[in-house]
Image (tube, rainbow, N blue to C red):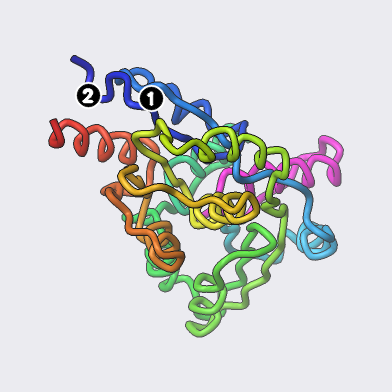
């Protein structure tokens, strides 16, 4: 029997990003349900990013912390350069999915940390920090561990917001439909970022609901797990590394051991 046979698993990623996770879970027998808790929209202003693009050759390193930041950067670069050739700084990414997004844009990845979290990315970049000029392209609201740590180590860090994570109000009706029943038919909920945690809880709060006990809460990594704890929920499983494959593996092993 497949390890996730007939397990009903909720996916909280954006609509665009949910398909990969759904495919991997369904390949192991799961029934997946999607409630997008994040909608990717433009930042309040592109001024910082446009200014950085105008002096791109001034930077030694270009840092991406998500596939969304890569896609938004590339779209803005194409709009500005209109097909002309551009020489990019060295590129550092937080993990494999971000690296794949860079490669899709036909850029070259120069650095991936051993662990796919901000703290490990900082550690990998520290040797390049003294007098280094670094451009961090990220969400409008994000943890400041990367710019703060690299600046403290002597780097000149420019932060350029490329997108915003917005709560999709269209998901409120989905939350009510799934969670309002006294007998919620879910075996697990997957969380792939701290934002998916906070936004699902915000959607539930808006509907005056909560996550019932007995549902496995699967976290992609320590930052996501901490977000769960901060909101009063204990992660049931945490992926060994911050990748979709590792998240699926940890959830599969959990249910296999629960038989």
Tell me residue 155's x, y (percent). 56, 78
Task: Please identify the residue farthest to the top as the structure is shown.
Answer: 1
Q: Secondary structure at mark 2?
A: loop
- What is the tally of numbered marks visible in this picture? 2
Q: Quadrant of residue 133?
A: bottom right
Taking the spot 45% from the left edge, 62% from the top edge, the residue there is 227
Residue 90 seen in the figure: no
Question: Looking at the image, is mark 2 or mark 1 nearer the viewer?
Answer: 2
Location of mark 2 (residue): 3
Mark sitting earlier along the chain (2/1) = 2
Q: Which mark is residue 8?
A: none
Towards the viewer: 8 or 133? 8
How busy is the neighbourhood of tag 2: few (under 14 within 10 Å), some, or many (20 plus)? many
* Residue pictured at 47% horizontal, 40% vertical: 97
**Residue 94 at x, y = what percent?**
46, 53
Residue 71's spot in the image, x, y percent? 67, 41
Instruction: Locate the N terminus and report the quarter of the image it occupies.
Output: top left
**71 or 57, which lies in front?**
71
Judge the density around disc 1: few (<14), some (14-19), many (≥20) Cα neighbours within 10 Å: some
Write the residue at 35% across / 45% down: 218
* Label 1 SS: helix
Mark yes or no: residue 123 visible. Answer: yes
Q: Is residue 36 magenta?
A: no
Q: CA distance from mark 2 to mark 1?
A: 12 Å
Specify the quadrant of the image occupied by residue 205: bottom right
Residue denoted by label 1:
24
Where residue 258 sits: x, y (%)?
A: 15, 36
Picture quadrant where residue 102 is located? top right
Judge left or right: residue 107 versus residue 163: left
- From this view, report whether residue 69 is shown above or below residue 4: below
Residue name at image x 50 percent, y 80 percent: 130
Q: Which residues are magenta?
A: 64-92
């Amino acid at each position: 029997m497949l390890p996730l046979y007939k397990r009903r698993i909720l996916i909280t990623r954006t609509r665009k990003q949910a398909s990969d996770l759904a495919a991997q879970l369904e390949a192991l027998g799961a029934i997946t349900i999607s409630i997008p808790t994040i909608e990717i929209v433009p930042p309040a202003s592109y001024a910082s990013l446009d200014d950085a693009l105008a002096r791109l050759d001034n930077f030694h390193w270009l840092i991406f912390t998500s596939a969304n930041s890569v896609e938004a950067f590339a779209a803005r670069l194409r709009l500005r350069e209109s097909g002309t050739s551009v020489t990019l700084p060295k590129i550092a990414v937080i993990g494999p999915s971000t690296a794949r997004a860079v490669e899709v844009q036909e850029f070259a990845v120069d650095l991936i940390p051993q662990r796919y979290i901000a703290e490990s990315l900082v550690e990998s970049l520290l040797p390049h920090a003294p007098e280094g000029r670094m451009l961090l392209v990220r969400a409008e609201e994000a943890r400041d561990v990367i710019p703060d740590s690299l600046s403290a180590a002597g780097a000149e860090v420019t932060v350029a917001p490329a997108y915003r994570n917005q709560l999709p109000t269209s998901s409120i009706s989905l939350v009510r439909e799934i969670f309002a029943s006294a007998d919620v038919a879910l075996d697990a909920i997957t969380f792939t970022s701290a934002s998916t945690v906070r936004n699902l809880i915000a959607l539930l709060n808006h509907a005056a609901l909560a996550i019932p006990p007995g549902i496995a809460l699967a976290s992609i990594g320590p930052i996501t797990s901490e977000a769960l704890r901060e909101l009063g929920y204990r992660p049931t499983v945490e992926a060994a590394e911050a990748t979709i494959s590792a998240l699926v593996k940890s959830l599969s092993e959990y249910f296999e051991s629960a038989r």
